[in-house]
Image: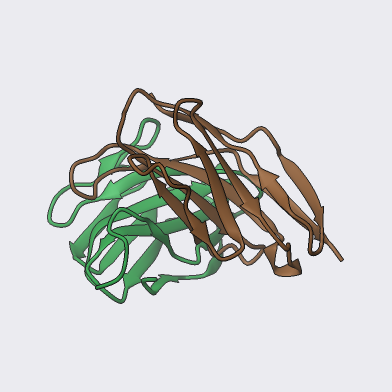
Amino acid sequence: SAVISQKPSRDICQRGTSLTIQCQVDSQVTMMFWYRQQPGQSLTLIATANQGSEATYESGFVIDKFPISRPNLTFSTLTVSNMSPEDSSIYLCSVSGVQREGLLQETQYFGPGTRLLVL
Amino acid sequence: AQTVTQSQPEMSVQEAETVTLSCTYDTSESDYYLFWYKQPPSRQMILVIRQEAYKQQNATENRFSVNFQKAAKSFSLKISDSQLGDAAMYFCAYRTDGSGNTGKLIFGQGTTLQVKP
């Protein structure tokens, strides 16, 4: 599958600060997504990162809290702003439309995740 | 809106035995994709198997196979000859109908599978 890396892999942050998570893919992709996952629970889609335009946010998530950038077809960032303990979670990047022969276009591939703890 | 339901929060299986994980979904679409993902304790989500709704034949990947019942909106995963490495959380997911590759995934609640030696 596509090789997806996320930085940092984990972090402990103080409330009121911001953290930017990076997602890098080893191939050009059409779509990039950001999810949030509480340990042992399912995934919740935060937003779809669109290349060259503003991200598309899901209900309950806003740009001021989770600004997203996608400057090219292989990279995206998610910032968690003005953090509170409720933001403690695992943040996952995923991609679809991987432009590599043999990979299924409609399938989403996931990064390893970023574990965030806010004190 | 589409929904995905996994009614078994936890399942256990003896090593080398077979186990079936259940998934049902609700949709008004006729063309879509269904997936099973595996998430081991290390958290990396891995694709196990996928099924295109327009295909009548059930997908198979080595020890993993699905029972896709389109009319019943059911999509169960069968794991044969279970191995210790199969222990993980399994998620069923439905891909919404988006143009090109814009379709989003809707996940079920997950089933934690324990494999006993």
Q: Percent x, y for residue A58? A: 34, 36
Residue at (19, 66) in percent of width and height? A73
Asked whether residue A13 appears in the rendered view, the answer is: no
Position above or below: B112 against B45:
above
* Figure check: A2 above or below B46: below
Foreground pick, A85 / A32: A32
Report which colour depicts chain A: green
Which of B45/A85 is in front? B45
Q: Residue at (50%, 40%) from the top-left corner?
A: B68
Give the brown chain's letter.
Answer: B
Residue A91 screen position, x and y as percent: 48, 55
- The residue shown at (38%, 62%) is A20
Quarter occupied by the N terminus of chain B = top left
Q: Residue at x 23, y 50 (%)?
A: B101
From this viewpoint, which residue is outermost toward the right? B117
In the displayed orientation, state which residue is furthest to the left. A52
In the image, taking residue A43 as reference, residue B31 lies left or right, namely: left
The percent position of residue B99, horizontal first and vertical second, equals 18, 42
Q: Is residue A106 left or right of residue A82?
A: left
Question: A82 or A104, which lies in front?
Answer: A104
Residue B23: image location, x then y, percent = 58, 37
Q: Is residue B49 above or below residue B69?
A: below
Residue B28 found in image quarter: top left
Q: Is residue A52 left or right of residue A2?
A: left
Scheme of image coloration:
by chain
Kindly tell me whether residue B11 is visible in this rendering: yes
Image quarter in which the C terminus of chain B is found: bottom right
Left of A79 or right of it: where is B91? right
